[in-house]
Amino acid sequence: MYKWRTELKYCLVALGFSSAIGILIGELILMWLLALLTLTIVNLYQLKRLNRWLLNTSTENKIDPPNSFGLWNNIFDIIHQIQKQEKKSSHLLGVILGKAQESSTVLEAALMMTDKQGNLDWWNLRSEKLLGFKKHQDRNQPITNLISDPQFLEYFYSQKYDETLKIESPTNPQKFIEYQIALFGESERIIIARDVTQIQRLENMRKDFVGSVSHELSTPITVFKGYLETIIDNIKDLDPKWEKPMLQMKQQAHRMENVVRDLLVLSALETKTLPKLQEKIKISTLINEIEADTQQMFLEKSHQFSIDCDESVLITGKRSELYSTISNLVVNAAKYTPHYGKIELFAKLSEESFDISVRDNGIGIDQQHLPRLTERFYRVDISRSSETGGTGLGLAIVKHILMRHDADLEISSETGKGSLFICKLPLTRVSQLSNKDEDQYNLVLESNH
């Protein structure tokens, strides 16, 4: 490797030689100027050669570096080595990229990459078939122009990609596409799209089946239950051995009626959207009403209820659904809290949401069951549910109602110490009640009563 010390030595030798000649002819400064001019011309010439070589190497015709001397020869060699290393790396990267592109063609999913501005950088062959992208025309186009569905635009810019998005295909309204987005680099995105048409059809069939069967069962169960009640009212006219079977049949008929009712509620929640015009509900009034109803329902247990609620908060939503959600949680707390137990209801603003909480000091739930509590018919303890008359659908209904109100459900519990359920409503659904609004609200309540 050429060293700067060698170059400095050559400069000092040139300076000494020009100084000696200058002293001999009596023109020391002139010789220094000539030496400096010569050195400048040589360096400018080498810069010109370097520039010409770099211009040539930027084209397809690669040429070796020109021969030189001293420091310039070292510069040419270093640049040439860097070029060779870059060429090797580019070739390796090309091979890897080629393999990635080749392997992506066999995937059933469409893969896309966008830059930080949201422009389409790269996509695989499946994207062209599934989403209608065109190889040369769509490169560097904003992906929101190519997939212009308003739901996709909201999902793309939200940067909240924990859940997937299912919408109609941009090329075929009969198909459904599921999108999953992940961030990487500097706000760049990788997008995976799958054709879930068949899955969506099966899901719709399941919803229709549950709704239809539940509706068809409701009438015969009502008739069956009605005849049983008539027989039980006249149980004295029957042989005493039939009393116990009849009472058990009535109990199971009532339980089946509750299951069918809850299935119909779930079916309606899944198939119907919230109305655009929604009510503004004074949450403190709603919670007080639920507390009074639950106390009356479990009067013999003598629970201690406490309420801590902001009196000025209004929630935008559907009153009957919010009543059902909170009531389900409070009734569950009452069911699994022993006599004289404590049930607390809170409704407060937090930093990111409005939280409606139900806490009890009942029997609690083991940690292993918490992730599955909102599944349909999931039971922590079958015998416990039979005793309380539960259908196993209450928390599934709660989950669906909260989803319809853009809210989440958080659950924490400890065996023997009680449970805490928190409904986290978005702040966009929260408003403050003014004095004028309160007067109007009270008038509405009075007119309803």
Image (cartoon, rainbow, N blue to C red):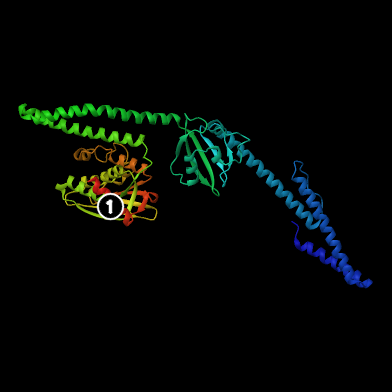
Vertical comparison of 180 with 171: above or below = below
Q: Tell me: 359 left or right of 273.
A: left
In percent of width and height, residue 149 lies at: 49, 38
233 or 112: nearer the eye?
233
State left or right for residue 277 relative to residue 236.
right
- Amino acid type, residue under disc 1 in the picture: Ser
Residue 445 in percent (x, y) is at: 25, 48
* Residue at the spot of label 1: 284
User: What is the quadrant of residue 264 in the picture?
Assistant: top left
- Classify residue 228 by image quadrant: top left
Closer to us: 380 or 423? 423
User: Hey, which residue is sitting farthest right in the picture?
Assistant: 25
User: Residue 350: in sight, yes or no?
Assistant: yes
Helix, strand or loop at disc 1?
helix
Tally of numbered tags:
1
Tell me if I can see residue 245 in this picture. Answer: no
Quadrant containing the N terminus in the rendered view? bottom right
Residue at 82% of width from left, 50% of height from top?
Answer: 67
Q: Residues within 10 Å of mark 1 (few under 14, many from 20)?
A: some
Quarter of the image holding residue 227? Answer: top left
* Residue in front for this viewpoint, 163 or 279: 279
Residue 284 lies, in percent from the top left, at 28, 52
x%, y% of residue 126? 55, 32
Q: Is residue 104 left or right of residue 32?
A: left
